[in-house]
Image (tube, rainbow, N blue to C red):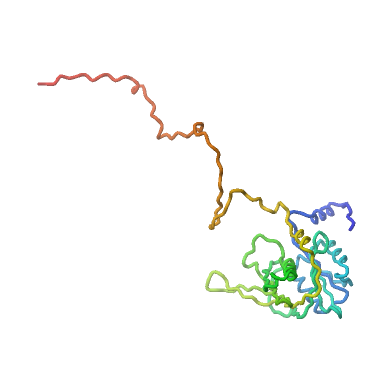
Amino acid sequence: MKLFKTKTRKGKRVLEDRAPKVHENDKTAVIVKGGHTSDIVTKALTDLYQLRKPLATHMKKKNPIHPFEDETPLTKFAAKFDTSLFLFGSNSKKRPNSLILGRLFDGQLLDMVELKITSFTPASEFNVPKPVLGSKPCIVLEGTTFETDPTMKRVGNMFIDWFQGPKLDQVRLQGLESVAYLSTDGETISLRVYRTMLLKSNTTTPRVELRLMGPAIDFKLDRKKLADDALFKTACKQPKELNPKRRKNTSEDVMGNQLARIHIGKQKTDDIQLRKVKALRKPKKTAADAAPTAPAAETPMEE
């Protein structure tokens, strides 16, 4: 891809915002429709876009591309909109109702998996209030396959990238308005999105209920194109500025207190200027105290 020098200040600011930095921007996504799509694929793309807003761009025009044969069009879309995630939906006789979820690193394809939709219920069929735009969901992965199988482990990591939302230092209790729940039995991946309802209780902590708000989707893993371990390790590498420097001779006890060991050289106590307390000072001699006292005269004793 050719790089052109900017002629305006606005263009320079755009390039500076896209340049690598220590604290990266929030991950954004681009959603692309294929040349042939079904009603299920269109609604699934729309629902997943609603969960990703405002960190997403939805391209509603059809694009007759085949990512597993040539991923160049998707990488160009990602470079155009400055995104690191993409979601592609298509429908064909050989592979009906398919979604392709992928992510990029340094402008090149990192991971890409094809998920076949076996069951789908759109969010419009659930009469549940939707969360506030841009809220951060709670992500739950259930199933040992997400930890033992290398492919499913990578798929779960990609879904975390999709649902994690903006980076925040703190989240208040009322801010957790939705839960993205992913489970697998080894063959099927189930996605359920719930709305958290904070209800009154007898204690200070509210009672929490989960109500299914959609979408509810079941997938089956089809094709995949995953990065090797070396490239994936490079993509996960953090800059040195983010790694805190290790402090020597420090430890932490069970109560969380910081303990440190200090090495002090031999001190010359003779040269140390000590503060003299007023109570310990010797009283100053006055002129009367300094004069010699006369001996007392002897008085005769009366007989």
Q: Nearer the viewer, residue 220 or 88?
A: 220
Q: Nearer the viewer, residue 265 or 91?
A: 265
Q: Nearer the viewer, residue 143 or 159?
A: 143
Q: Is residue 225 above or below residue 288?
A: below
Place of residue 199 in the rendered image (x, y in percent of width and height, measured from the top left)? 59, 74
Q: Is residue 99 above or below residue 84?
A: below
Place of residue 135 in the rendered image (x, y in percent of width and height, measured from the top left)? 69, 67
Tell me the residue at 89%/54% (across/down). Answer: 4
Place of residue 69 in the rendered image (x, y in percent of width and height, measured from the top left)? 88, 70
Q: Which image quarter holds the N terminus?
A: bottom right
Q: Is residue 196 above or below residue 259?
A: below
Residue 153 seen in the figure: yes
Q: Is residue 200 above or below residue 234?
A: below
Q: Nearer the viewer, residue 233 or 87?
A: 233
All told, the count of numbered labels is: 0
Q: Residue furthest left?
A: 303
Tell me the residue at 61%/48% (across/down). Answer: 248
Tell me the residue at 56%/52% (across/down). Answer: 258
Residue 123 seen in the figure: no
Query: Image quarter for residue 169?
Result: bottom right
Query: Image quarter for residue 68?
Result: bottom right
Query: Image quarter for residue 179?
Result: bottom right
Image-based side of 275 in relation to 2, left or right: left
Q: Which image quarter holds the C terminus?
A: top left
